[in-house]
Image: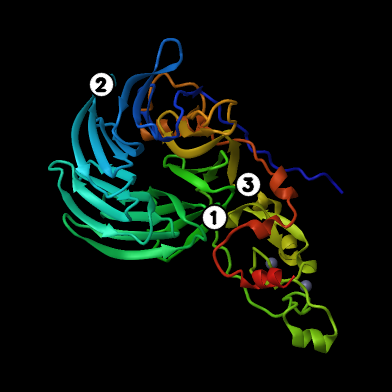
Amino acid sequence: MAAEIQPKPLTRKPILLQRVEGSQEVVNMAVIVPKEEGVISVSEDRTVRVWLKRDSGQYWPSIYHVMPSPCSCMSFNPETRRLSIGLDNGTISEFLLSEDYNKMTPVKNYQAHQSRVTMILFVLELEWVLSTGQDKQFAWHCSESGQRLGGYRTSAVASGLQFDVETRHVFIGDHSGQVTILKLEQENCTLVTTFRGHTGGVTALCWDPVQRMLFSGSSDHSVIMWDIGGRKGTAIELQGHNDRVQALSYAQHTRQLISCGGDGGIVVWNMDVERQETPEWLDSDSCQKCDQPFFWNFKQMWDSKKIGLRQHHCRKCGKAVCGKCSSKRSSIPLMGFEFEVRVCDSCHEAITDEERAPTATFHDSKHNIVHVHFDATRGWLLTSGTDKVIKPGQARAAWSPLLALLPPPQPCFPQTDSDMESLEKNHILLKGEIYTGKEAAAEDADDEVLRKGDRVGEDRCQAGF
Ligand SMILES: [Zn+2]
Ligand SMILES: [Zn+2]
């Protein structure tokens, strides 16, 4: 048999530009300061720090400010240099940063929540500060008057918050796995709809206002792309993580989605690819390929004097099949499965090499990511989280935001969209190496893959043996 020649994508791994270390506690959020070699971080140790790159090449704090309570989140608006910080005690504190990033001046405080602020969004166009808290409240305040404009009680604690400025829709993802869409007016809001697709809590949301797509990441390891603009209720699952998805970012110019996992895995998805929805799993008492009964089908087992088989599902056609009729595995990138999953033998034969070509690249940041920020103008990706390796004698691992990505900063910034496009296509991380080894090796790995839809059949089966 001739050797299979796989088209090899241009590989380009992210390059580590800099590690910024210096906090004993978890950094909950960090952002890149546009056009500056600077980073703003907020931490559980109550500090707000602005880090600037010095002549030595190292990042040193130009601002070190201690808040009265641990800092859980922030929103930074580069145009106005307004920094809104969410605290563990429920307060949102607003500051103005000086032009040289050496000073921050307090502006006002909002008594926004009863407990820890989980997300903040400052909307310059409307002068609104949107926030969610551990008190299960979504609230919005006027950033001019400081007054509370309204609130909405969410079904669980929210951990994802996005806003569409044009239509004034707010998207709230919560720990129950639900995404709620509200339409905001100046002083009231109406519930538009809710949707649910994850089997775990929503951990992050990301909104693409151009394609009108909402992405949700979840503790169930998956990302779902919700086609809001299409209004057909299309939801595509993206399966490429081995751990909870913690953070999402979208690069509009290159149409790439960056998802980060708690295990440090970074997956960059090509969103120019048209993917299909996964089929609903079919129910059957016998294999839909060879007709052998599944083990709970006692009547057929008795009649045919055959022992029942375990039920599985083909991820491509959704048919209920036995193990023998689904002995092979395949990735199905065009259905969002970047890892190998169970497919029935006929689907396995039908899948072409072209269809198997990966539509995402995989990287390991080597630290546990809690937040990510992407600076599209330079192709920089900033991740924050704890180190995987806990150094001896330390109670906690030092945090180490990772300024990844290629290449070293460009001498000038792109001026036009096409400049931007060519800059990004040529230089951004995205064409990395694919790690398939460990996923492919795991026996029955597809059973681990969490998916929406019904898996009662297999659960029943497992309970029986
Ligand atoms: Zn069969
Ligand atoms: Zn099939």
Element marked by disc 3: loop
**Amino acid on which the number 2 mark rests in the picture:** Lys
Residue at numbered disc 3: 358
**Amino acid on which the number 1 mark rests in the picture:** Asp
Q: Is residue 151 above or below residue 434?
A: below
Q: Earlier in the sequence, mark 2 or mark 3?
A: 2
Q: CA distance from mark 2 to mark 1?
A: 41 Å
Residue at numbered disc 1: 220
Element marked by disc 2: loop
Q: Would residue 230 be found to the left or right of residue 361 on screen?
A: left
Q: Dot 3 surroundings within 10 Å: few (below 14), some, or many (20 or more)?
A: some
Indicate the quadrant where residue 266 lies.
Answer: top right
Q: CA distance from mark 2 to mark 3?
A: 47 Å
Query: Total marks drawn?
Result: 3
Residue 132 appears in the rendering = yes
Q: CA distance from mark 1 to mark 3?
A: 21 Å
Indicate the quadrant where residue 93 lies.
Answer: top left
> Measured from the top left, where is residue 379 in percent x and y?
46, 31
> Measured from the top left, where is residue 374 in percent x and y?
43, 35
> Measured from the top left, where is residue 174 in percent x and y?
40, 56
**Amino acid on which the number 3 mark rests in the picture:** Pro
